[in-house]
Image (cartoon, helix red, strand yellow):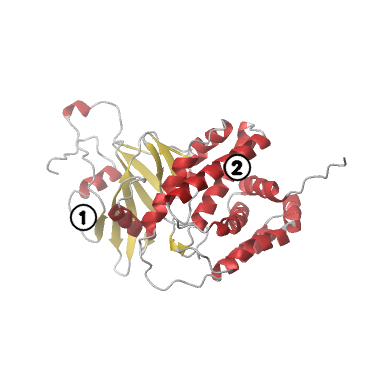
Amino acid sequence: MGENPLTERDRGVTAALLAALASEPPAPFAARRFQPLPTLSYGQADQGTGVPVERGFGEHVDMTNHSVVVAESVVVKWLTPPVPLPHPTPEIFAHLVDAGFNETAPPYAALTRSDGKSELLLALVTGYLPEARDGWEWCVDACASADTTFATPLGHLTANLHTALATLPAPGPLDAEAGLLGRAMGALEEALSLTDGEDGAWLATKAERMRAELTPLGAMASGPRIRIHGDLHVGQILRWRDGYAVIDFDGNPTVTEAAPYQPPARDVAQLTTSLQHVAQVAIKRRGTAPTAAADWVRRAGHDLLTAYTSTCDLLDESLIRPFEVEQECRELIYAARHLPRWRYAPMGVLRTWYEEKDEDPA
């Protein structure tokens, strides 16, 4: 291992992987490297400190895959199960490094294995961000305390990400824009069919208004289509010791047919709807007053969009609302199929949008 010797406390598989990445791994394994790994050597003074070289993120973290922190410096995300290539993340990691985009956990390497017929992605290696919390924690705190100072840096971050991704060329011709409307209408119909009870009855009364709001997706968008993040909600935004970072470029696991190249408004709309969901969480779990939560959403959304549009000119703002409506439909589908207790959040948002106020008899 040369200048990076491992000590006897490095007994874990994940630490052993990082040791193996110091050289070329043996067949059938291979590594694609994006940036040099940090030094992970230990001196005699590090022995017996009681600090484990490996640790998880804790049971409270909801992750599809298995992530391990090594030496408080590196995170290895083991894909469970391994995923056949091509996979979006290695390509995006390489491009973001080339583009000089640094508002993410530093991408170091991807580990793959050949099974003789195809190549499988086994693990992704990135930097560990000290004191990091995801948006379902820090952003709920912000809503509960009426703090919107995060919104401007978050808008700049999103614009910088899109500026970097916009220079990633599409591998071939892009599909017609008309497909956006068909997918959105399909999501609405599925949400209507899966949402039962009082919520379903209420939703059915708003279906025509929702269809009308989706119709702009049938027109040709005025802005470009770029390689988007594809699953950009506040849970993918870490607030850490030195600022904010966007993570997880695997795409949306619940929308398998989603095209990787879409209008940037898709990402922006998912991010703004997640702010609405944060408000619903704060109302339900923190006792935040609905009026205060609504004001927080308005101010935060305004500041986020202002920062985004002041940083880049990729956004067709006319597409934000229809994409927001589609996103709430997809949230209802996700709740029905995977997490029924989540339904309160998209239903709370939709009621905020569409519930007609009682007329003042005066």
Residue 338: percent from left, percent from top: 58, 52
Q: Is mark 2 on a helix, strand or loop?
A: helix
| Front in this rendered view, residue 264 or 14 | 264
Residue 206: percent from left, percent from top: 73, 57
Say left or right for 327 vs 111: right
Dots 1, 2 in contact, CB < 8 A = no
Q: Which amino acid does label 1 sit on?
A: Pro
- Report the quarter where the C terminus lies: top right
Q: What element carries label 1?
A: loop
Question: Hey, which quadrant is residue 313 in on the image?
Answer: bottom left
| Front in this rendered view, residue 46 or 255 | 255
Q: Name the residue under label 1.
A: 25
Residue 249 showing in the rendered view: no
Q: Which of marks 1 and 2 is nearer the N terminus?
A: 1
Furthest-right residue in this view: 361
Residue 3: percent from left, percent from top: 13, 40
| Front in this rendered view, residue 252 or 162 | 162
Label 2 crowding class (10 Å Cα cut-off): few <14, some 14-19, many 20+? some
Q: Name the residue under label 2.
A: 298
Of labels 1 and 2, the one closer to you: 2
Q: What residue type is labelled 2?
A: Arg
Residue 329 showing in the rendered view: yes
Q: Residue at 47%, 57% (x, y): give it.
A: 230
Residue 294: percent from left, percent from top: 64, 40
